[in-house]
Image (tube, grey):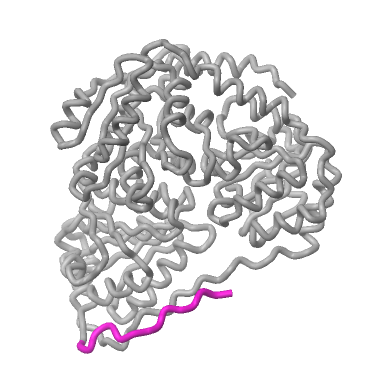
C-alpha cells in the first residue's frame, strides 16, 4: 500500500541553477526547516532559500544544528536536515550526525564543498567528505552534476527514512551549485510502502514458544515507536499476561502506570528489572537494537530462548541466538501472535513491579539539600504533563532519568543511548519545541553537557522557541567520577568551575533561577513553564547517591 504520490509540477518556466533545483527537491520531500550555518561554499544554496517556504534556522555551531536535526528526526519520523559549509563546518556536523545514525533517527546532512576543479589536489579547507561520512551513514555521496540532483535528494531521504532509519550525507561542490539546469529535471514521486506481514510459519513458531514458556518477558525497544506499534504492544501484553521492560530509548511505549510495566532496563549494573531477565526462560525482543542494551548484559549464560520481532533481521551476536525471528510489520505480528499463543495463568511479575514502584516513591518527600537525583525526578514528573517532552543529555543524570523517570507516552523522554553524546540537551529541546510547539520542551542536563552547546540559547531566543533547561549542578564530570570510584576508589581530573548560570541566562536575554532548598524546585518549574521563554534552572544535585546506588544494586536481593 502506497501513499498517494505528489503530483509532478513544473518547477519554473525558465531554467534555474542547480542550487535552486536542490531546494525545490527538498520542498518536494516535505522539508519545512533546515538547521545550519551559512558559508562561502554554500552561497548559492543560501540564496535559493530566500525564495523558498523552507525556514532556515541559523545556529551558533554546526554540532547544535546536527543535534537539532537528530532530535527532530527521531520525534517526527521525518528526516531532520542540517547544513554546513566545507571543511571545519562539515566536520562539526559529525557528532550529531553520528548520534542520529546510531540512534536510528532519520537525518540528511548537506555540506558545501570547494569547486570540483580543486578536489584532486591539496587545497584550502578541502577534505574528502564523502569518505569521511561514509562509515557513519547509510548513504554518502557527492553531487557531480546538477542533472542528477532529483535522484540524489530522493535517494538521500528514502535511505534516511527507511527502516532502520539513519543518516544520509550530501556533498555539494560550489561550482556544481551554480550550474544552469533544465527545468525538465523534476522532483521524483515520494512513495512510502507499508511493511509486509511476517511469514505465517514464523508467527506460529513464536506463538508456540510463548505458550510453552514458564516465565516469558518482553523487552521493547525503540523500533516499537518507529513502527507505531505501542498500542498493539500493550494489547499483546494484556492478553498474554506478559511483563514488559523497555529500553532507555523506548520509554513510554507501555505507560509506567500500566500494571504490566516493570520499568526500564539498560544499566550495566544489576537492577530490579534485571531480576526479571534473570528469571526469564524466554525473552521476547520487540523492536530491539543491540545498541540499546547489549545481550551480553542480560543473557550472560546464553541460556535464554529469544524471539526477535522487528521489521528487520537481527544483528549477529553470540549472546543473541534466536529461537524465532519474526520479520515484518511489528503491530501486525503482535496482533497475530496474541490470537494464537496461550496466555500465562497469572501475571508473575507483580512483586517485581511493586518493588520498583515503591522505590520510585521513597524519595518523593526527601528534604535534603542539595537535592537527591530521585527527588528531582519525582518533582519533575509531578509538574510536567504526560505529553510534554524531556530531552536527557548524557552524564550521571542520564542514568537516573533512564532508570526512574516515568513515561506514560512514547517519545516523551528522549535519551541518546546508541552514540550517547554529551551536548544533545539544549539543541534537542529546541528541536522538540519546533516539532511540537504546543508541548512543554525541557532538557535535563548536567553542568558539563550544558556548557557544550549552551550557545544555542541565543538561537532559541532569536527564533522565539520557549524551552526549559534544568541543569543538575555539581561542578564535576559526575558520571566519570562514578566510574572512577567504582573501579579505582579515587577520582582523577574531573572538577571544573561554572559561571553564574542565572547571570549567564540573563546576559543572553533568557530567564534564570537558582534552586536554594528542597521545596523550591516544583514552584520554580511551574514559574518557568508560565514564563513561556527560554529558562535556565540551576539545581544543585547530591551525587553521593551514585555510589549508594552502586552499593545497593551490588547487594540486591531479587523480589521474584
Q: Is residue 383 found inside the magenta-colored segment of the image?
A: no
Q: Which residue is drawn at 63% across and 37% down?
A: 258
Q: Quadrant of residue 135?
A: bottom left
Quadrant of the snapshot with the N terminus = bottom right
Residue 95 rendering spot, x and y as whole percentages: 35, 46
Q: How many marks?
A: 0
The relative height of residue 153 versus residue 124 in the rendered view (above or below) is: below
Q: In which quarter of the image is residue 376?
A: top left
Q: In which quarter of the image is residue 205?
A: bottom right
Residue 361 rendering spot, x and y as whole percentages: 55, 21
Q: Which residue is drawn at 41% across and 47% down?
A: 99
Report the magenta stretch's main SS.
loop
Q: Is residue 55 left or right of residue 76?
A: left
Visible residue check, residue 67: no
Q: Is residue 10 found inside the magenta-colored segment of the image?
A: yes
Residue 355 rendering spot, x and y as whole percentages: 65, 22
Frontmost residue, 307 versus 459: 459
Q: In this view, does 502 lie to the left or right of 249?
A: left
Visible residue check, residue 233: yes
Residue 560 rendering spot, x and y as whole percentages: 74, 24
Q: Which residue is drawn at 18% across and 48% down?
A: 462
Magenta stretch in the rendered image = 1-14
Frontmost residue, 198 versus 391: 391
The relative height of residue 534 versus residue 127 in the rendered view (above or below) is: above
Q: Is residue 288 left or right of residue 283?
A: left
Amino acid at each position: 500500500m502506497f501513499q498517494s504520490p505528489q503530483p509532478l509540477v513544473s518547477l519554473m518556466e525558465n531554467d534555474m541553477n542547480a542550487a535552486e533545483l536542490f531546494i525545490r527537491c527538498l520542498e518536494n520531500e516535505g522539508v519545512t526547516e533546515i538547521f545550519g550555518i551559512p558559508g562561502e561554499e554554500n552561497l548559492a544554496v543560501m540564496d535559493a532559500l530566500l525564495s523558498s517556504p523552507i525556514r532556515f534556522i541559523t545556529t551558533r555551531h554546526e554540532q547544535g544544528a546536527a543535534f537539532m536535526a537528530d532530535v527532530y528526526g527521531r520525534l517526527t519520523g521525518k528526516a531532520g536536515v542540517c547544513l554546513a559549509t566545507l571543511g571545519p563546518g562539515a566536520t562539526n556536523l559529525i557528532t550529531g550526525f553520528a548520534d542520529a545514525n546510531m540512534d536510528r533517527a532519520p537525518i540528511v546532512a548537506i555540506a558545501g564543498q570547494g569547486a570540483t576543479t580543486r578536489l584532486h589536489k591539496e587545497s584550502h579547507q578541502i577534505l574528502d567528505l564523502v569518505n569521511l561520512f561514509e562509515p557513519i551513514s547509510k548513504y554518502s555521496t557527492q553531487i557531480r552534476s546538477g542533472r542528477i540532483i532529483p535522484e540524489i535528494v530522493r535517494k538521500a531521504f528514502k535511505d534516511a527514512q527507511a527502516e532502520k532509519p539513519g543518516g544520509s550525507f550530501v556533498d555539494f561542490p560550489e561550482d556544481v551549485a551554480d550550474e544552469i539546469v533544465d527545468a525538465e529535471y523534476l522532483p521524483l514521486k515520494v512513495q512510502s510502502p507499508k511493511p509486509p506481514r511476517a511469514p505465517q510459519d514464523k508467527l506460529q513458531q513464536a506463538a508456540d514458544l510463548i505458550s510453552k514458556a514458564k516465565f516469558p518477558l518482553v523487552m521493547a525497544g525503540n523500533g516499537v515507536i518507529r513502527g507505531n506499534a505501542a498500542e498493539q504492544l500493550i494489547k499483546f501484553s494484556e492478553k498474554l499476561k506478559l511483563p514488559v521492560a523497555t529500553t532507555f530509548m523506548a520509554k513510554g511505549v507501555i505507560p509506567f502506570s500500566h500494571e504490566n510495566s516493570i520499568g526500564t532496563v539498560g544499566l550495566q549494573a544489576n537492577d530490579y528489572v534485571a531480576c526479571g531477565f534473570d528469571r526469564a526462560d524466554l525473552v521476547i525482543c520487540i523492536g530491539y537494537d543491540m545498541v540499546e542494551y547489549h545481550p551480553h548484559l542480560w543473557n550472560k549464560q546464553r541460556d535464554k530462548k529469544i524471539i526477535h520481532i522487528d521489521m528487520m533481521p537481527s544483528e549477529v551476536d553470540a549472546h543473541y541466538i534466536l529461537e524465532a525471528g519474526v520479520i515484518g510489520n511489528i503491530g501486525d505480528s503482535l496482533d497475530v501472535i496474541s490470537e494464537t499463543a496461550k496466555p500465562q495463568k497469572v501475571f508473575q511479575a507483580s512483586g517485581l513491579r511493586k518493588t520498583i514502584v515503591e522505590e520510585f516513591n521513597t524519595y518523593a518527600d526527601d528534604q535534603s539539600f542539595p537535592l537527591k537525583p530521585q527527588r528531582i525526578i519525582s518533582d519533575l514528573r509531578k509538574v510536567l504533563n504526560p505529553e510534554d517532552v524531556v530531552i536527557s543529555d548524557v552524564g550521571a543524570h542520564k542514568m537516573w532519568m533512564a532508570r526512574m523517570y516515568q513515561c506514560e507516552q512514547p517519545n516523551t523522554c528522549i535519551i541518546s543511548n546508541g552514540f550517547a553524546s554529551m551536548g544533545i540537551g539544549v539543541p534537542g529541546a529546541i528541536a522538540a519545541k519546533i516539532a511540537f510547539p504546543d508541548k512543554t520542551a525541557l532538557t535535563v542536563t548536567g553542568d558539563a553537557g550544558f556548557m557544550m552547546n549552551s550557545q544555542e540559547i541565543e538561537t532559541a531566543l532569536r527564533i522565539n522557541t520557549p524551552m526549559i533547561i534544568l541543569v543538575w549542578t555539581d561542578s564535576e564530570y559526575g558520571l566519570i567520577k562514578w566510574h572512577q570510584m567504582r573501579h579505582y576508589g579515587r577520582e582523577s581530573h574531573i572538577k571544573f568551575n561554572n559561571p553564574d548560570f542565572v547571570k549567564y541566562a540573563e546576559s543572553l536575554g533568557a530567564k534564570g533561577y537558582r534552586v536554594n532548598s528542597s521545596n523550591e524546585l516544583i514552584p520554580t518549574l511551574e514559574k518557568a513553564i508560565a514564563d513561556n521563554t527560554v529558562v535556565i534552572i540551576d539545581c544543585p544535585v547530591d551525587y553521593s547517591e551514585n555510589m549508594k546506588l552502586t552499593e545497593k544494586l551490588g547487594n540486591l536481593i531479587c523480589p521474584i
